[in-house]
Amino acid sequence: MLTSTYIHIPKIGKSTEHKIWASGITTWEDFIKYHDSVPLPKSKQNIILEGINESMERLDKRDTEFFANYLPNSEHWRGFRYFSDSVAYVDIETTGLSKIHDYITVIGVYNGSQTKTFVHGINLDDVVDELNKYEFIVTYNGACFDLPFIRKEYPELEFNRLHVDLIYPLKKLGYKGGLKQAEEKLGISRSDNTTQMSGLDAVRLWNRYQKGDNDAIDLLLEYNREDIVNLETILNTIYSRLIDKTFSDAKKEF
């Protein structure tokens, strides 16, 4: 989908992008070949051609920061397939909701094949080196919750890369509510141990662990691992639907 995208080019908005698609041109290469068939002023065609050339160069260099800076945040998902070999699915657990008074207890990172958990008081600081490995971040409500908490703890992590907060593409497809509600509607199951758990339960488990209950931390880590693994399942499940809806919504203008 990224190579069908034009809205990251300066002075090019969604209406122009939709007009290009309505002309039967969906890829950058097609625009280069057939741009004269698009009903746009020559000056705007030239802007797009210049933007495409730069975008191709940036993509060849895997410059995720370029696309993160110029794509609207709600459209970062378009880059998923091009950076799918360098994705971190991230979820945190905390002692509460306040970024001032509460702190991170667990950060889970899943790269599509391996899960890693970083625990307060044990190895939490190691998450900085881990997250710096990836070019693409996926969270659920991470823009408002997870990433601000992590930035507070580790300001050296700039997250200057593509980030998909799944709450927004899911909303675009008509799904509302929290992660567990989205999983249920998409038919994604959890283990018997965690199926009824919530964020509040995660806080309680941490408090029990602080009092010496090692079984509590085991269950908390299991809960967190299911969160991050399910983020991948959700994105893979809805990705093609997002593409279809993006194009179908554009057609309604013409």
Image: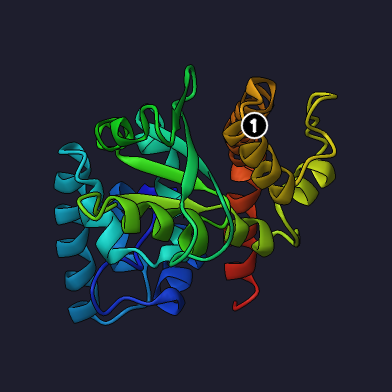
In the rendered image, is residue 26 in sight? no
Frontmost residue, 31 versus 107: 107
**Residue located at (14% from left, 63% from top):** 50
The residue located at (18%, 80%) in the rendering is 43
Instruction: Indicate the position of residue 221 as horizontal and vertical percent values.
Output: 60, 27
List the residue tagged with mark 1: 220
The answer to which quarter of the image holds residue 62 is: top left
In the picture, the quarter occupied by the C terminus is bottom right
Residue drawn 29% across the image and 52% down it? 159
Q: Secondary structure at mark 1?
A: helix
Q: Looking at the picture, which amino acid does disc 1 mark?
A: Leu
Q: Is residue 2 above or below residue 220?
A: below
Residue closer to the observer: 168 or 121: 121
Horizontal arrangement in the rendering, residue 188 relative to residue 53 (left or right): right
User: Relative to 239, does residue 43 appear above or below in the rendering?
Assistant: below
The mark tally for this picture is 1
Residue 150, compared with residue 22, is above or below; it is: above
Can you give x and y, in whole percent of width and height, for residue 111 in the image?
Answer: 44, 26
In the picture as drawn, the residue positioned furthest to the front comes out as: 211
Residue lying furthest top: 113
Is 69 situated left or right of 19 in this image?
A: left
Q: Where is residue 86 shown, x and y percent of the image?
A: 35, 30
- In the rendered image, the vertical position of residue 108 relative to residue 140, given as above or below: above
Nearest to the observer: residue 108 or residue 87:
108
Indicate left or right for 218 with 21 as reference.
right
Residue 94 is at least partly visible in this image: yes
Q: Nearer the viewer, residue 59 or 151?
A: 151
Looking at the image, which residue is at 22% across and 52% down? 65
* In this picture, residue 221 sits left or right of residue 40: right
Q: How is the image coloured?
A: rainbow
Q: Residues within 10 Å of mark 1 (few under 14, many from 20)?
A: many
